[in-house]
Structures are given as C-alpha cells and as structure tokens.
Image: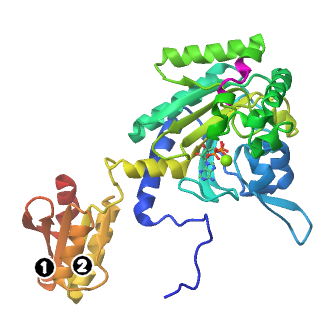
Amino acid sequence: MTKKFQSIKGFYDVVPERQKLWRFFEQQILLVLDQYAFQEIGLPIVEPTGLFVEGVGTHTDIVEKEMYSWEDPLNQDKLTLRPEGTAGCVRALIENSLTYNGPVKLFYRGPMFRHENVQKGRQRQFHQLGVETFGIDSPDADAEQIVLLSRLWKNLGLSNIRLELNTIGDPIDRKSYRELLIKYFEDNKSVLDEDSQRRLYENPLRILDSKNPTMQTLLNQAPKLIDAISADARTHFDKLCQTLNAHGIDYVLNHRLVRGLDYYNRTVFEFITNDLGSQGTVAGGGRYDYLVETLGGNSTPASGFAIGIERVILLLEENSSIQNNTDPEVYIVNLGDKARLLAFSTAERLRDNNIKTSLNIEGSSFKSQMKKADKSGAEIALIIGDEEADKNQIQVKFLRNEGLQCAIEVENISRYIKENL
Ligand code: ATP
Ligand code: MG
C-alpha cells in the first residue's frame, strides 16, 4: 500500500520508544543547568533573514546554502526558519535589555532548520540546546561551560567523547594571519580541492577544517593561528587551559579547529565522538565578544555552545544501561461492568497518590489483559472482577516476584502499593 502522505526528507517523528531517551536527556541537562544557575529563554522559530546574514556571516555554509528563507506575501518581509540559536538569543538580549543589571547566563532549546545533505546524525530539522553567557570576559566563563558539558556526559553515562580546543584570537589577529594563510595556500594551489579554491579569498580559515584526505598533509603543515595571536588573547587561552587542567578535564589542542560560524573569537571548542562516523561533533561553541555589538547592542563579551540533541540521542541509544523511567508502576486489569467502574476510580485514586498507573480500557479477555500488564513494564498488576467489586477488594499481583498475589481492601490500596513498590 502506498501511503498518502509522508514526512518530508530530513524531517523526522520522534516515536514514543525514542522519546524516552529524549526525556532522559532533558531531565539530566535541566538538572545540570540548574546547578550552574543558567536561566531558560524562549525564542521564536522564525526571524528576519538579515539577522542570520549579519550574525552568522555571509561566507558560512549556513548563509550560503543551508537556510530556509522566504518572503512574506503580505508585507514582503524577508524571513528565515532559524538555522541556529545564538543570533536570535542575542537579538532577544538586546531587545529586552537583559544585561541591564549585569551579566546573564541563558539557555534555549528547540528545533533548528538547515537545508543540507541528509545522513545519519544530519537532519534538516534537528534540535539544539544552546547555552550563552553574556557580559563576562573572563576565561572562567568559557571554562564553566566546558566543565558543565563534561559533567553532563558523565551524568548521561557517555564516556567516549573527547574535547578539542583551540584559540582563534581576535579579529585583528586574524587579519594578518589571513594574509599569511592565503599566501601559503597560493603557493600550494595545486593541492587545494575545488571547494577550497572557491573559499581561498572569501574564508581561507574554513579551508583548515576540510576533511578531504588529499589535503591533510598540507593543512597540518599550515601556519598556526595560535602563533599569530596577541599577548592578551594568548593569556586568555593559557588561563583557560590552566583551569581545565586544575579540574582534570582532558583535551586535545587542535590548531585546525576554527568552527563554521563567523562570529567566534578566542576560545573555540568541540566535543567529538568516534561512534557516529563523520557526524561526530555532539556539541560545539566558543567565545563571541563582537556579536552583540554587530547586531546593534552595547559591546558585550559573550561565550556559548550548542548541543546537537539528535546526536546525543544516537549515542544514548547505543548505551543500553539507560533506565527507562516512563513505564507505569501499576497496570489495572478489569473484567465486568461493576469491575470497570471500580477500576476507573481506583486508577484515579492511585494517580492522586502520584503512582503511575495504566488502566486497561480496551476491554479484552483476562488472558490478553494479563499479557499487556506483563509487557507494560509495571511492577504490580491490580486485578478487578465483578466478584472483587462486590467485596470492595482488589487482587494485587507482583509481576516480577514469582507472581505473588494477595487481596487488599480498596481503601488501603494506595498505601499498600506505596509500601510495596
Ligand atoms: P557540522 O560540522 O556537523 O555541520 P556545524 O559546525 O554546522 O556542525 P553548529 O552550527 O556548531 O554545527 O551546531 C552545533 C551542533 O549542532 C553540532 O555540533 C551538531 O551536534 C548539531 N548539528 C548541526 N547541524 C546539524 C544537523 N544538520 N543535524 C543534526 N545535528 C546538527
Ligand atoms: Mg554544518
């Protein structure tokens, strides 16, 4: 049978089985964000196209080829489905004067949209959780975010993620480095692939993170940005490394790490796993001290990162030790008209007492209801027939304990279950 409608390429449903992992991720990250006192901000999914052109940068993959943009037929506004969250967060910061009383630490979450080649771990609608610190120029703001992420991976039970770190200095440092790099690439032009030749004068730094195997030797031997940065930028980086060392955070210095968005300066970092093929970056971020000003606000130092949630979910999926905590605790089996009424009110009574309860409302045979109770993941099945209803009693069956069974008065049922769960 051909289906009438299908989801469009790169846009996915999250079926309930998977949603459990999303829940687990959300519970853990929210806990950690609370521990570090970050506050949530809600942001729109549609923004003016110019926000991303100016914020993310004209010569980036996102602006060059990945945005879903259109013109509003009513008023000709140029609009875009947000491809990332930082630009919108900065717009909101300025619009709501959020730094009026000093530094703020924010996070946002939700879907992002990029028109790119669909692969495992690369969708067209995907979800990010982003964290931004505004108003703090100290390297400790960068360190705090990195330490937070390390704690998150640990709490999620994910161990196979490494931290790669680099500094890209300030815009003024990059100007002279850019010339140096262009010269180096010009001298080796025959080794550059088509994409890199196109980028040579627009965005030569981006060539550094090319994965093309034939260019690796050339790129590894390229002049290093870290050798071209100012003393201040260097001190910032050294302090960051010191703090990470002092907290036992392992990292790899990767002088070719530049990140795909134009707004970064000084610190850039990525958390990468080898378990997801070439879509291995699960979170990335860095410092962007010039973006708030670029978008019309007062000069405000800032750093931030975004987690690619789908990639974390893929990792969690391979890690079977995760406890599924959305199963019901109690499953109610019932047969007969009187039993049906008692079962319904008992279910409500249990929920009043915060017991997760699944009530059979399909009315199938006793045998099939018992099968469903077993499959539900519940610890306890309550069995109610008309006979029990007449006596105001309920049969309690412990599903994981060799089927131990007893009869309990309706009035005592919540207390009994609480004592025995
Ligand atoms: P990549 O190099 O994989 O394209 P990026 O540099 O474009 O990543 P960022 O813009 O820094 O990614 O976004 C932060 C994180 O969001 C990424 O590290 C990744 O985990 C996730 N992400 C980015 N694009 C996608 C996508 N199309 N599908 C799923 N996750 C994505
Ligand atoms: Mg990308």
Q: Residue 132: which quarter of the image? A: top right
The answer to which of 21 and 402 lies nearer the viewer is: 21
Magenta stretch holds residue 287: no
Q: Does residue 392 lie above or below 180 as drawn?
A: below
Picture coordinates of residue 250, whole percent (x, y):
48, 23
The kind of residue on which mark 2 rests is: Leu
Q: Which residues are magenta?
A: 219-226
Q: Residues within 10 Å of mark 2 (few under 14, many from 20)?
A: many
Q: Position of residue 42 (x, y in %)?
A: 67, 51
Q: Is the residue indicated by label 2 positioned so its CB lies within 8 Å of ligand 1?
A: no
Mark 1 lies on a secondary structure that is: helix
Q: Which residue is mark 1?
A: 388
Residue identified by numbered label 2: 342
**Is the shortest distance between ligand 1 and the CB of mark 1 under 8 Å?**
no
**Type of the residue with mark 1:** Glu
The Cα–Cα distance between marks 2 and 1, rounded to whole angstroms, is 9 Å
Residue 313 can be seen, yes or no: yes
